[in-house]
Image (cartoon, rainbow, N blue to C red):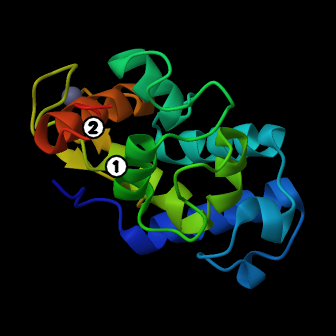
Amino acid sequence: MPNPHVTPERVAEEVRAALATTLRTDAAAIEMDNSIVNGLGATSIDFLDINFRLENVFGIQLATQLILDHVEEELGEGKAIDKDGKVTPPAAEMLKLYLGDLPGIEAGIYADEISTVITPAVVADGVVRVLDTLPETCTSCGASAWKSDDGAKVVCGAEGCGRDAVYPNGDELTKRWILDTEGEKHLFADA
Ligand SMILES: [Zn+2]
């Protein structure tokens, strides 16, 4: 369910701000659909830094593992990445379902190259996926009184509570998504 306390615009704005700070560039110049690696020169360390900033702003935990690593863990070694380090056909299909049909995602690309297709919009999607799992009620006091004073961090509005909302973490959500998607589409069934 969409999180009523944090708008997609706010998420996009914070993704731009995190990228701008980490990569020392102008937030206004960042295009949501450009490759972060190719367009802005981000390294894997930069991604950690960007995620860390977003986690602090929204009070969430983003996935630390790449989706293909999760696919291998859940569905079996060699299912997503072949012995040459290339993405298998069912894994490419799953990536397209997860990331959207971005240019550059196809079977046979090197798994290492997937980071080059990540855009600010993909990062924003990852944040929204977590935010949309806001539980019905506060895990601390059981009240259903969420509010957000800054439009980013959701806290319990019940008197005497005020605790931060606790979301499932990004890795957990990715795993769930993989199992649900495979259960529905059977991408790896014959692979
Ligand atoms: Zn509470």
What residue sits right under mark 1 in the picture? 129
Binning the other alpha carbons within 10 Å of mark 1 as few (below 14), some (14 to 19) or many (20 upward) gives: some
The mark nearer the N terminus, 2 or 1, is 1
Residue 18 can be seen in this image: yes
Q: Nearer the viewer, residue 27 or 126?
A: 126
Q: Secondary structure at mark 1?
A: helix
Q: Identify the residue at horizontal 20%, vertical 22% (top origin).
A: 139
Residue 184 placement: quadrant: top left
In the picture provided, is 126 more to the left or to the right than 135? right
142 over 156 or under it: above or below:
above
Q: Badges 2 and 1: C-beta atoms under 8 Å apart?
A: yes
Q: Identify the residue at horizontal 22%, vertical 36% (top origin).
A: 182
Residue 122 image point, x, y percent:
51, 60
What is the C-alpha distance between the residues marked 2 and 1? Answer: 10 Å
* Residue projecting furthest to the bottom: 29
Q: Which mark is residue 177?
A: 2
* Circle count: 2
Residue 76 image point, x, y percent:
39, 16
